[in-house]
Image (spheres, helix red, strand yellow):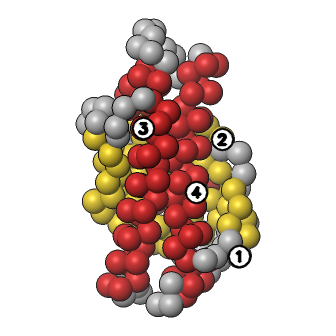
Amino acid sequence: MDKFSEMQVGALCEMGNIGAGNAATALSQLLGFKIDITVPHVRVVPIDSMEAWGDRGEIKIALYLKVEGEVSGKALFLMSTKSGEFIVKTLMGGKEGLDLFHDEMACSAIKEIGNILVSSFLVALTNFSGVQMQSSVPALSIDMLGAMLQGIFLDSEDVGEDILVLDTEFSGISAIEGIFMFIPNGDSLKKLLGAFGL
């Protein structure tokens, strides 16, 4: 973290709050009631520390997509299976017995939620920095956290040294927390901060 100044992290935090606001508006429209999303914590963490995350043995829902353009990498949103099931159940009108591992409609619904969340943060990054980025269609994975992260890293040709991590908190539906990550290629994170004029 000491490679990044307080002003740089502050700029990332502001970007995160804008992305969260966009995501909250879109989700509120989709679900039919008001949802607030806040970003209480922004971190720039060394990629080496991700190994410790993978040792937790947790099953997570990951929605991720490729980012291309002036800044490139991977963007993903992580949440617990319990949170994912709750959101999908709400989206599908309280339907019981949802199985995120096998139910095609449930998987489609969670992909749509993930697309809104991840895309909202990427749009905020683009608008805030002026750096053009294009994203792919989101992919869904439900697996052990370590296995998913390893697969994402292996699929990246030039992973940068640091990862942007934004913790998020949802209110209005239940106590739901999620994590947005931007895993940059090469020096993309530095380019992004440079675009902020920092």
> Mark 4 or mark 1: which is in front?
1
Q: Amino acid at mark 3?
A: Ser
Question: Horizontal placement of 170 versus 61: left or right?
Answer: left
Q: Quadrant of residue 140?
A: top right
Along the line of sight, which residue is nearer the eye, 24 or 198? 24
Q: Is residue 93 visible?
A: yes
Residue contact at pointers 3 and 1, CB within 8 angstroms: no
Q: Amino acid at mark 4?
A: Ala
> In terms of sequence position, does the residue under pointer 4 or pointer 3 come before the other?
3
Q: Rounded to the nearest whole Å, what is the CA distance between mark 4 and mark 2?
A: 11 Å
Q: Which mark is residue 75?
A: 4
- Residue with the mark numbered 1: 70
Along the line of sight, which residue is nearer the eye, 25 or 101? 25
Q: Rounded to the nearest whole Å, what is the CA distance between mark 4 and mark 1?
A: 15 Å
Q: Secondary structure at mark 2?
A: strand
Along the line of sight, which residue is nearer the eye, 116 or 45? 116
Spot occupied by residue 179 in the image (x, y as percentages of width and height): 41, 51
Residue in the picture at 33% in, 58% down = 39
- Residue with the mark numbered 2: 139
